[in-house]
Image: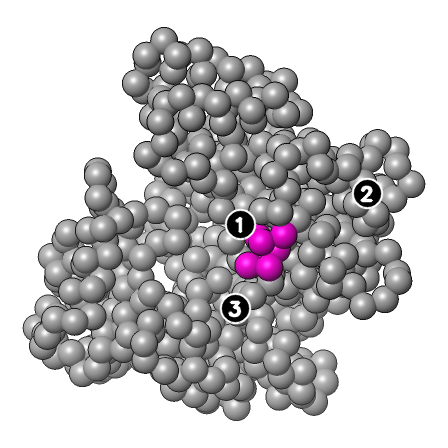
Amino acid sequence: MDAGSSVAALVEAAVTWSAEDPDPGTRAELDGIVRRVRGGDEAATADLRDRFSQRLEFGTAGLRGAMGAGPNRMNSAVVRFATAGLARWLQRAATGAATRRVVVGFDARHKSASFAEEAARVLAGAGVQAHLFTRALPTPVLAFAVRHLGCDAGIMVTASHNPAADNGYKVYAGDGAQIAPPVDREISAAIAEATSLEEIALASDDHRLIERVGDDVVAAYLDAASSTPLAGPARRVGIVYTPMHGVGRAVLVPLLERCGFVPPALVAAQAEPDADFPTVAFPNPEEPGALDLAERAAGAAGADLILANDPDADRLAVAVPSGGGWRRLTGDEVGALLAFHLLSEVPVTDDRRPLVTTTVVSSRLLSRIAADTGAAYAETLTGFKWLVRPALAHPELRPVLAYEEALGYAIGELVRDKDGLTAALVVAAHAAALRAHGSCLEARLDEIAARYGLHATAQVALRYDGAGARDRLASVMRHLREEPLPRVAGRGVRRRIDLRSDAHVPEGSIAGPLPTADAVILELEGDARAVVRPSGTEPKLKVYLEVVEPPGPEGIATARAAAADVLDDLGAAMRALLDG
């Protein structure tokens, strides 16, 4: 519905939607809003307009948004529409007579289990076999299950690290990877074909096409993950672990035990699934304060390592002892540690040339490690929907690591998406191997910096609020593209690359030109760089900064301090440049 629709039209749309809404809770919620709108409540009218301005957008990763009533929220009706569209697309894409098969998983968020049940019943009603998880499990286990069970698609009900009020619906193709264009657009078009829930057949929860799965899939995942190549026999390392009120504990703890580690100490207040995330303002281990409880527990235990998953366990945060406190490693630092370790110290499983992959906004350090070790290197747009593509396109190569700076890592070929569980296993094994030789992860980072130069990264975010925020953001990006920009923070701009129009092939990447994207890369004098792109979900610009400092005779600490000063200057300059 158009945002400028009359109040009467809004109310009519809401009444029609409410009449079909299968959830008594959201039906009552919507009816209450309609009553307030009819009473002249302007805030309720604005709320209703937002709920009916559009359908919750089905993007490459599926759906994600606040739970509530209406087509622009996550609810049972939206899940039914989405699943019916997915089933329709699968049936059309079928080349044989075999029944299509979809595995459906869910995390421990509010309504995740009921949304998954709704999806399974719609699939069965459409003649599609649904393999429905019996309990809340991590997203990587669902991604693994797609190929393990030989399914044509997978659905994971999760909002990952979003706030407690949100939920989502993530879709995987039969190859176990997130759907990518043009499939997302095709599914979105199929979803739009249904205009009424009455058109969607709904099977009973005991329908013959609904099969309950769970522990057998977890056992298979643990068998496969525990076969991940690890360096040496050392497993002695003191770990404090937090699943951040999510579902990672039930899989990661037994995985570590299978591989010879003493069970990690748990952050007690965050150890059990809790959909309200009571100890963190935002259940994302990247956020300030999210690891405070873990750091206190690790300090009390004298631990060597902190490992933290987000609530669906697809991301991993790492912290290490440093200077009497704890140093939270960036995604780029963990990516460098994993790459150097896996390419240099872990026994190879076959003779294929290794492949490492990262994104255009991540550090360029990975490309330099790859060149030094003889590995193939690929660079993609942000998101694992892109990061797994080079490995799929080059089966002659052996995928070793794909990572993005936002704490996402895929180890080997087990899961074609980010997997915070096997990543935690390899980080723990790496830390144990270094400890056995009197070293640690922080010292290894210094060794990498001494070898390849200190690659320091930082991120700046600029939010545009109020009316016309999106227009101002677009104007800022247009200005960045079109206006002369000779210097940034005193550094000359060597090259400006517009990913919307320039055919850009990152140096050394086997993946070829990047797809078009709304992003600009500024290559600066002195081996520095800024990548600017709008957020896909908020009126916000993200700026990814990197500077490389050579490790001079003064040592790594001096180079690190110099790099931090440069990043501060670049960040301030980019804020001033992009302030809309």
Disc 2 and disc 1: Cα gap in Å?
Answer: 22 Å
Region of the chain picked out in magenta, as a range: 184-190
Q: Give coordinates of residue 127: x percent, y percent.
A: 83, 47
What amino acid is labelled 3 in the image?
Answer: Trp
Badge 1: how crowded within 10 Å, few (<14), some, or many (20+)? Answer: some
Which mark sits nearer the N-terminus, 3 or 1? Answer: 1
Q: Give coordinates of residue 517: x percent, y percent.
A: 38, 68
Judging depth in this view, the residue of 172 and 305 nearest the camera is 172
Badge 2: how crowded within 10 Å, few (<14), some, or many (20+)? Answer: many
Which mark sits nearer the N-terminus, 3 or 2? Answer: 2
What amino acid is labelled 2 in the image?
Answer: Ala
Residue 422 located within the stretch drawn in magenta: no
Residue assigned mark 1 = 58
Judging depth in this view, the residue of 110 and 352 nearest the camera is 110
Tag of residue 386? 3
- Position of residue 56 relative to residue 432, above or below, is above
Q: Do the residues labelled 3 and 2 touch (CB within 8 Å)?
A: no
Q: On the rendered structure, is 153 left or right of 76? A: right
Residue assigned mark 2 = 124
Residue furthest toward the top? 39
